[in-house]
Image (cartoon, rainbow, N blue to C red):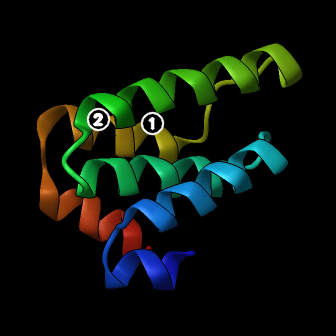
Amino acid sequence: MDARLALGASSSLLRDIRALVLDQPLRDRPWEQLMRALYLTGDPAGALVTYQKARASFSEALGIEPSRRLQQLQGSILQRDDSAIARLALA
């Protein structure tokens, strides 16, 4: 998914990532990919809602907060910091 996302986000990619999130709701990476894809397609609000859904999922199932990386992505989206979002994608 990361390679496809690097080539550009599209509606079919969003659909595939959403399916991955549904299949693996307790993994950070699919949530992160979905947040980045939504942001890159011009939907920062959707990306932030996705973060809240991930946070609720982790909290309810595991009693934990999202990873630091996911929290950093949320902060970068709130600040609309494209360079930080790109750096996180490469890390």
Q: Residue drawn 49% across and 51% down?
A: 34
Task: Give the percent coordinates (x, y) of residue 32.
Answer: 51, 51
Report the residue that reaches farthest toward the front.
Answer: 12
Residue flagged by tag 2: what amino acid is it?
Gly
Which circle marks residue 71 in the picture? 1
The residue that mark 2 highlights is 75
Res. 24 visible in picture: no
Residue 5, picture quadrant? bottom left
Q: CB of mark 2 within 8 Å of CB of mark 1?
A: yes
Task: Give the percent coordinates (x, y) of residue 24.
Answer: 81, 49
In the image, residue 17 sits, relative to residue 22, either above or below, namely: below
Q: Residue drawn 63% across and 55% down?
A: 30
Q: Are there few (<14), some (14-19), or many (20+) residues within 10 Å of tag 1?
A: some
- Screen quadrant of the N terminus: bottom right
Position of residue 19 in the picture relative to residue 35 (left or right): right
Q: Nearer the viewer, residue 1 or 90?
A: 1
Give the mark count. Answer: 2
Task: Give the percent coordinates (x, y) of residue 43.
Answer: 25, 40
Q: Residue drawn 48% across and 30% down?
A: 51
Q: Secondary structure at mark 2?
A: helix
Q: Nearer the viewer, residue 31 or 70?
A: 31
Disc 2 from disc 1: Cα separation: 6 Å
Task: Give the percent coordinates (x, y) of residue 79.
Answer: 13, 36
Residue flagged by tag 1: what amino acid is it?
Gln
Q: Secondary structure at mark 1?
A: helix
Position of residue 43 in the picture relative to residue 81 (left or right): right
Res. 5 visible in picture: yes
